[in-house]
Image (tube, helix red, strand yellow):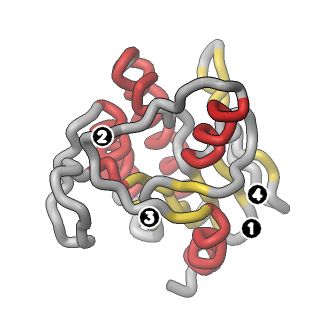
């Protein structure tokens, strides 16, 4: 098993019969990893798989980055909080209400065992995404375009951000200047 070390090569790690890939990118500066099992509903349906991918997979990526002296920036979620109030601070206790949030919190703990690693908790991401799975706003737009009623939550406080706004601070963290 190895970690790609040049350019912005895809970040892939062999994992038995399957592969964990597309979960981030690695450069000479550092690794960016956001986890792979992101759908909260999918995590609730299959908590074992959510743990395998989000926790065990992330732990292995963190170990490999640490061994290769590559800084890891792990993109987590605001769903590590309970969602019972409209805003949170870095010092608030993480008390996830869902499997997805619990697996992301456990992954954060694994990542932070490395002294150079950084965890960034981001809220609901909107704007243009990449790949087959869209951002929150893309999912709503796609459903409306197809004549389907979008499925939204009514029992959470969320503070959305756009994907483009995340790039500059993530780049700064990868460079190790913050």
Q: Secondary structure at mark 2?
A: loop
Q: Residue at x 32, y 48 (%)?
A: 79
User: Can residue 158 be seen?
Assistant: yes
Q: Residues within 10 Å of mark 2 (few under 14, many from 20)?
A: few
Left or right of 28: which side holds 69? Answer: left
Q: Secondary structure at mark 3?
A: strand
- The reply to whether the C-beta atoms of the residues labelled 3 and 4 are less than 8 Å apart is no
Quadrant (top left/top right/bottom left/bottom right) for the N terminus: top right
Which residue is labeled 3 in the image?
120
Residue 83 in the image: above or below residue 114: above
Which residue is labeled 4 in the image?
5
Between marks 3 and 4, how big is the CA–CA gap?
22 Å
Between marks 4 and 1, how big is the CA–CA gap?
6 Å
Between marks 3 and 1, how big is the CA–CA gap?
20 Å
- Picture coordinates of residue 108 (x, y %)? 36, 52
Q: Which mark is residue 28?
A: 1
Q: Earlier in the sequence, mark 4 or mark 1?
A: 4
Left or right of 12: which side holds 101? Answer: left
| Number of dots carrying numbers | 4
Which residue is labeled 2 in the image?
154
- Picture coordinates of residue 163 (x, y %)? 62, 62
Q: Earlier in the sequence, mark 3 or mark 1?
A: 1
Between marks 4 and 2, how big is the CA–CA gap?
43 Å
Q: Which mark is residue 20?
A: none
């Amino acid at each position: 098993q190895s970690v790609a070390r040049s350019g912005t090569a895809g970040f892939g790690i062999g994992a038995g019969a399957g592969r964990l890939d597309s979960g981030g990118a690695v450069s000479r500066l550092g690794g960016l990893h956001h986890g792979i099992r992101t759908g909260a509903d999918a995590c609730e349906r299959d908590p074992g798989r959510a743990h395998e991918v989000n926790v065990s997979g992330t732990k292995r990526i963190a170990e490999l980055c640490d061994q290769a002296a590559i800084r890891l920036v792990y993109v987590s979620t605001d769903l590590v909080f309970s969602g019972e109030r409209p805003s949170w601070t870095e010092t608030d206790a993480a008390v996830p209400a869902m499997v997805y949030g619990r697996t992301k919190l456990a992954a954060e703990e694994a990542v932070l065992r490395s002294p150079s690693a950084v965890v960034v908790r981001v809220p609901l991401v909107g704007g243009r995404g990449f790949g087959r799975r869209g951002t929150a706003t893309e999912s709503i737009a796609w459903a409306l375009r197809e004549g389907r009623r979008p499925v939204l939550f009514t029992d959470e406080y969320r503070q959305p951000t756009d994907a483009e706004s995340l790039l500059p601070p993530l780049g700064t963290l990868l460079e190790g200047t913050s």
